[in-house]
Image: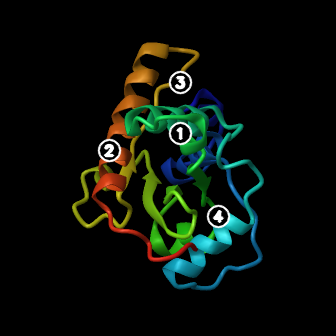
Amino acid sequence: MYKEAKHYEGGEERRGKLSEHFLLGSLNTETKMYLPYREAVKLAKDIQQDNPASPKKPFMRDLRDAIVHKMDFKNAKNAERLKIYTAVGTPLDHFHKADMFVELEDEDGKNSKIATGDATINKEKISDKDKKADVLIGEIPDPTENKEEYNFAVAELAEKFTAVLKAKLSFGGRA
């Protein structure tokens, strides 16, 4: 868990929400009702406050860069097809259990593949076989405290997201 979240009072759920915010960012939306998956993805994309090809949050930027490296894109233009989004606070988070997602657009930008991630510090949830997200993101070491462990965790997650993206069929259009 990032050290910023450690300094706040409250139970594990409150610390978990704060950890998600510091790690992934968060979004404010008026939409609190259920949306089908595809619509929830579109809403999260539409209200992003960050550039999904070059995020400001260090973890999101580092994870995207590591996935780009693992995908072995041949040039920077191809790498721009990979985008990373926060979904914390959106219907995608609340109803589809995805705190973030990575999107890989095809070469003409008409179709894409999406791999979702759920960040949690709940040990039971990490081992849960009934997870909804493609990748569970456990506790991430603070890079200011242990850069080597942080880099290892990011590389391990990049490997998982890359495997999911390579195995998925096209989203059949874009959200």
Which residue lies at the image location 37% right of the left edge and 51% below the top edge? 136
Identity of the residue drawn at 53% across and 33% down: 65
Q: Secondary structure at mark 3?
A: loop
Residue drawn at x 35%, y 67% is 132
Reading the image, the residue beneath label 2 is 160
Amino acid on which disc 2 is placed: Lys
* Quadrant in the rendering for residue 167: bottom left
Q: Amino acid at mark 4?
A: Gly
> What amino acid type should be assigned to the residue bearing mark 3?
Asp
In front of the other: 94 or 161: 161
Q: Position of residue 129 (x, y in %)?
A: 22, 61
Query: What residue does disc 4 label?
Result: 89
At which x and y percent is residue 36? Answer: 52, 85
Residue to which mark 3 is pinned: 142
Q: Is residue 121 above or below residue 145?
A: below
What is the spatial separation of the Cα atoms under label 4 and label 1, in whole angstroms? 21 Å
Q: Is residue 49 left or right of residue 34?
A: right
Q: Amino acid at mark 1?
A: Arg
Residue 171 location, x and y as percent? 44, 72
The mark that comes first in sequence, 1 or 2, is 1
- Pointer 3 or 2: first along the chain: 3
Quadrant of the image for the C terminus? bottom right
- Please indicate whether residue 85 sits to the left or right of residue 170 in the image: right
Residue on which the image places disc 1: 64
